[in-house]
Amino acid sequence: MNPANYLKIKNKIPSNVNILAVSKGFKSQEIITIQNIGQNDFGESKFQEAFEKQLILKDLKQINWHFIGRIQTNKIRKIVQNFKYIHSVDSFEKLQKISNISCEEEKNPFIMLQVKLTNDPSKGGFNPELLIAKWEEIKELKNIILTGLMTINPKGLSSEENLGLFKKCRILADSLQLPDCSMGMSGDWEEAIDAGSTWLRLGSLIFGGRS
């Protein structure tokens, strides 16, 4: 656990860049430690683990919960009910279902659409051309606030390669008039900032290694 590291990064990043503290695999007490020094946005990728923490921390009303994991269709209602932001919407079908359930639940989650910029079989996401083709249809969906794009770069890229892919994501977001890009993790956050990220997903840099 490294609060000093968190403050160092916080002081280094531009004012328009937000830190999303990726708390999956860490305990509620560790979330409290970071929240006490000003961090209110926390990212979780497994619904059940997240929900248990949400119950424990329900009195901390300032916390904004972000869902960043692969979305299982049968968990969409629970995700809509319990998360303010959803970063990992990787298909039109799931987006449509989120919209329908948000209408039923009278919710308006902030949505980032996951885009796939390389042929990485381990990652999901919209193909950029398909996203552009579907865009008018996507904009018609109700009870969701489309705020940006999210991408995850493959492991093992050089700094230049990371920067290049992040720039592609930023250019695509700008072309769709979306303000946010959720891109950059503990290993490539500096390149993500250079490319125009507005949300950095940082786990080990803030919390240390997972046990």
Image: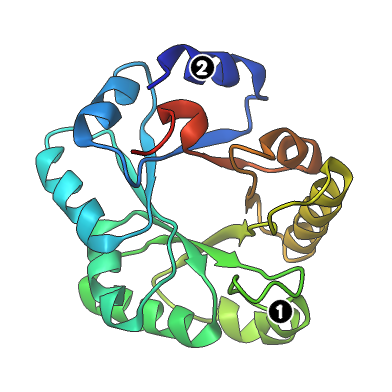
Residue 21: name its quadrant. top left
How did the renderer colour the structure?
Answer: rainbow
Identify the residue position indicated by label 1 in the image. Answer: 127
Residue sitting nearer the eye, 170 or 108? 170
Residue that appears at 63% across and 25% down = 15
Q: Amino acid at mark 1?
A: Asn
Residue 201 position, x and y percent, is: 53, 43
Image x and y of residue 178, in percent:
66, 58
- In which quadrant of the rendered image does the C terminus lie? top left
Query: Is residue 186 shown above or below 93?
Result: above
Question: Do the residues bearing badges 1 and 2 touch, measured as CB atoms within 8 Å?
Answer: no
Secondary structure type for disc 2:
helix
7 relative position to 77: left or right: right
**Residue at x 39% of width, y 71% of height:** 143
Q: Which mark is residue 5?
A: 2
Specify whether 14 is left or right of 20: right
**Label whose residue precedes the other's in the sequence (1 or 2):** 2
Q: At x 29% / y 79%, what residue is drawn? A: 101
Identify the residue shown where x is 22% and y is 69%. Answer: 78
Q: Nearer the viewer, residue 109 or 19?
A: 19
Question: Between marks 1 and 2, how big is the CA–CA gap?
Answer: 36 Å
